[in-house]
Image (tube, rainbow, N blue to C red):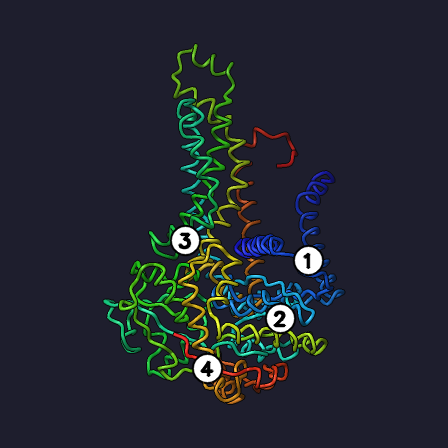
Amino acid sequence: MYTLSRHTIRTVVSPIAFGLGLILTWELVCDAFKVSKFIIPRPAAIGPMFFSHWSVIWPNALQTLATTFSGFAIGISAGFLLGVALGASANLHKTIFATLIGINNIPKVAFTPLIVLSVGLGTVPAVITSALIVVFPIAIVVSASVAQMDPELNDVMRSLGASRYLAMVKIGIPQAMPSFFAALKIAITLALVGSFLSETVAANRGLGYMMSRAASDFDVELVFSGLTMLVVIAIILYVLVIVAERRVVGWAYRKGGST
Amino acid sequence: MTLFVRSMISPAVAFALTLGALALPAKPAAALEKIPLSLAWTIGGSNGPLYIAMDRGYFAAEGLEIDAVPGDGSANVVNRLASGAYQIGFGDVPSVIKYDTLNPDKKVMVIYNQFPSDLSIVSLKGRGISTPQDLKGKTIGAPTGDTAYKMFAAFASANKISADDMKWEHMAITLREPMLIQGKVDAITANESTAYFALKGAGIPDSDMVFIRYPEHGINLVGSGMMVNESYAKEHPDTVRKIVKAFNHGWEDSFADPKASLDAALKRDPLLKPDIEMGRLKYAIKGMVGQPDAKKAGIGAYTDETLAASIDIIAASEKLTTKIAPKDMSDMSFLPPIAERHLPTATIN
């Protein structure tokens, strides 16, 4: 019982206390230095706005969540398949990897307007941007860990008559799962950034649209309410990935180890 | 994300400007007071008057050195001044009216009249739009911060239509004209000059452009002006007076020699297209010289009647509960004497 509660303190209470402490410091600093609300409004001013504008924030947050999830799902599926293919075939890797790295380095800020011009505005470009931003980190991480498949295990499998495909499914892919989930944690927040970015460029709904509109109306509190919502969404998505990770690749971690 | 990108772009441009400034011949070493100044947008032909005043030493003669930093939209200049990030800049006067009404304790004051607003609905031939009534049932593209979009309610009620009669699509300002050309929207809200030069740059002939101008449909609004943080103006009235004087001199020189004025701006940004920017500068000069206030009170001045008319329109379309008095959002006391603010004698084409 004693150890359990210490565990609870470490994993639940301390992060929350740290977050609250940060908000309290923010409030005190704004108060002490009389920071203008046009630079950073105080949490005490944002809080009530956040709740009174909930009916505006919520539908926009749902839209952003929907595009983030769709983009994330498409992005990780494509990234995973691409990563496995690249990891399994050295020739494919040599042929297209340099190009992939090149494409990955085009800033998405430059990409999104082009997407909008070809497919129109709103949900579709947000999903595409968010998927595009996710594909590459996943593919690169997965390909690296698939390529490092344990040679001894692979040899054993092959000498027992397993096909390359079976060795990949039984050894390569399971071995890549811990790195895959590590990449997911980065990818989920990137997906959110991608959706948000596209919404600021061209959309009639979503947190990105809401915040750029609020900024042009001098509504600083609503901008920060949107930011708060983004932070909350990012944390929730991150926690969801961790939960999924625990279920799928719990075997890879020490007991009580941190992720 | 975009805020981050924007904040990265401005320092980058400022850095490029600094490099450009270093390449210029060194001025005699006098202790000049450095004044950071926010432009409304990236450097363009209409900034010629500022740069010619800098190049001809009008600011240096007053003991000042202007550090002009590109902005990210004329409406955002008000935010920049209100936050204290900048003390002085060029921006959108309707935004000042709204901002000062809502924030009477921390105001931004308009101190120089540049040109009136040229808000317009812009469409292309073949889209079936030539009058406000034609907009019913059409799709209109509007950046959320666009002044013509924000004032649409006033335009609509003056022309017996409603914003609910059409479908609205919102996008970044850089995508607006491309989406119109592509046919993703039937019309856009814009400043005529911005849209005109963007469409022209994209190869659209003048004869294919359709403008439903707000001023021709009952909505005459103030446009671009020089503005200052009120507390700064109170603490440093002489500095503000000197800035306005040197800047006004730059306008006078630009009337006399638009080419020299344009060259001063082009020098700062080698990517600018000279013919397009010349068009912008001449458009700005025409707007400035042609407005009734310039004839009545000299270049750079606003009359209270003009401001009051705009305040009425903005209060109605932004649903403001109080109406600000012209003297609470503008201060014409920094202007040089009217003899130094005369209209150009030759007409500019």
The answer to the question of whether label 2 and label 4 lie on touching residues, with beta carbons closer than 8 A, is no
Relative vertical location of residue B10 with respect to residue B214 in this rendering, above or below: above
Label 3 and label 2 in one chain: no
Q: Residue B345 carries which label?
A: 4
Chain that bears disc 3: A
Residue drawn 52% across and 58% down?
A: B267
Q: Where is residue B235 in the image (x, y as percent from the top left)?
A: 72, 76
Identify the residue shown where x is 43% and y is 41%: A75
Circle 3 packing at 10 Å, graded few (<14), some (14-19), many (20+), is: many
From the top left corner, tell me how far across and down residue A42 is, in percent. Answer: 67, 65
Q: Which mark is residue A221?
A: none
Residue closest to the far right: A32
User: Image height check: is B83 above or below B231?
Assistant: above
Rendered view: B105 above or below A72: below
Query: Which SS class for mark 4?
Result: loop
Name the mark on residue A23. Answer: 1
Q: Do labels 3 and 4 share a chain?
A: no
How far apart, in angstroms, are the residues tagged by discs 2 and 4?
22 Å
| Residue type beneath disc 4 | Thr
Mark 3–mark 2 Cα distance, whole angstroms, equals 42 Å
Picture quadrant of residue B197: bottom left
Tell me which amino acid carries mark 3.
Pro
Distance from Cα at disc 3 to Cα at disc 4: 45 Å
Write down the residue under mark 3. Answer: A113
